[in-house]
Image (cartoon, grey):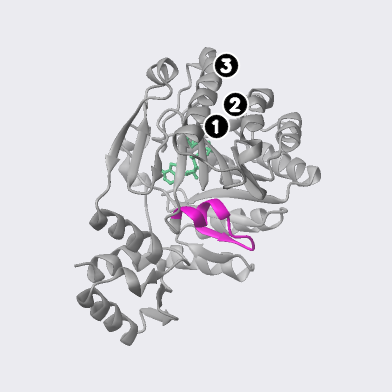
Amino acid sequence: MLLYLHIPFCDSKCHYCSFNSYVEKFHLKERYMQALHTQLKENLDRFGIQPYSIESLFIGGGTPSTIPAEYYAPLLQTLQPYLCADAEMTAEANPNSATYSWLSNMQQLGMNRISFGVQSFHHEKLKRLGRAHSRDDALRALTEASELGFKHLSLDLIYATAFDTPTLLEADLAQAFALNIDHISAYALSIEEGTVFQQYPEVAKEQLEQTQWLFRTIEQHGFKQYEISNFGTYVSRHNLGYWKYRPYLGIGAGAVGRIANQRYYPHRDIDAYIQTPCFSTTETLCEHEMKREQIFLGLRSIVGLSEHLLSMSELQRAQLLVNENRLVNNDGIFYNNNYLLSDEIALFIED
Ligand SMILES: C[S@@+](CC[C@H](N)C(=O)[O-])C[C@H]1O[C@@H](n2cnc3c(N)ncnc32)[C@H](O)[C@@H]1O
Ligand code: SF4
């Protein structure tokens, strides 16, 4: 079982981001954390979660580092009996708010992995993306996290922007690899509704050759690509769990959970969530939808696609792709070695 906790607060809104987060509701932090705790306890109970069965906790956002570490303590105490001994425990953090004491206190609470939203180390690119931190903030936060001895450190980068040049991306990667990290998430900029960039769609500029160069360069540093946007000497259990279609609890405003064929959505609006944290709407997924999701997730990651999932006609089409060297079949699982083609391949295979 995976567990996701959502923190919907940010110091400022980045120009590209449509995640559920608020910059003007900091006065609700304490009540929000109490509501999270209420939903957590209710969900553990409602879904009959067994002791030691949670293999990964991911605190994401928004910006988890905008919340003082002590506000997480009661939730982690409740969770303690449910966590596997070697659970992966990740918190996302922004360099400007991940202070030494925040990092240290989160580590004391059991977090063993920090995923930093760095996006770039280039001053002008950070400004254009609307980031609230500088290159030096990022270097400080990552260095301090490393000194504290976190087991796993990751950073997010954004590429495929109109501000990118080969020199800029090369410098970003060189700087990233000079740090003590074992994981990089590299996301191509996408233009989302309701963001500043929606008015400037030309800032998203994906160039296939540049993307291929980026992937190659990250891999040359020994970080294996295990999903279209994820690379590491360490494979995140949480990420892999999503792509393996493992069930997950979704706690928080705008979070999503899925247990078997039930996908549930707590309130997205923070005020409504605080009022009724245990409320959720539920969508029942049919077999066809679940299969479709597994095909898409498997083909964009090292998880692959099991033969057992496919109909005769789908198997035949998958076999055609094996003959064309687009897929590899290993022990009854089809693996895709070019994740950039994963959606096209999935659409081709599906009935
Ligand atoms: C949930 S967000 C938040 C993490 C954290 N608050 C931060 O900004 O550092 C996780 C990552 O998604 C990526 N992201 C968000 N919106 C994106 C977009 N429109 N295009 C590409 N990447 C995006 C960013 O790299 C970001 O670090
Ligand atoms: S990218 Fe991160 S910091 Fe920026 S608005 Fe989105 S969640 Fe907040």
Residue at image location 31% in from the left, 63% down from the top: 343
- Compute the Cα span from label 1 to label 2: 6 Å
How many labels were placed on the picture? 3
Q: Would you name the residue on which mark 2 appears?
A: 66
Q: Would you name the residue on which mark 1 appears?
A: 63
**Percent of width and height locating residue 130:** 49, 33
Between disc 3 and disc 1, whose residue precedes? 3
**308 vs 170, nearest the viewer:** 308
Identify which amino acid the numbered label 2 is placed on.
Thr
Label 1–label 2 contact, CB within 8 A: yes
Height in image: 125 above or below 311? Answer: above
Span shown in magenta: 230-242
Residue at image location 53% in from the left, 49% down from the top: 157
**19 vs 195, nearest the viewer:** 19
Whether the residue carrying mark 1 lies under 8 Å from ligand 1 is answered with: yes
138 lies left or right of 344: right
Picture quadrant of residue 59: top right
- Compute the Cα span from label 3 to label 1: 15 Å
**Percent of width and height locating residue 336:** 40, 72
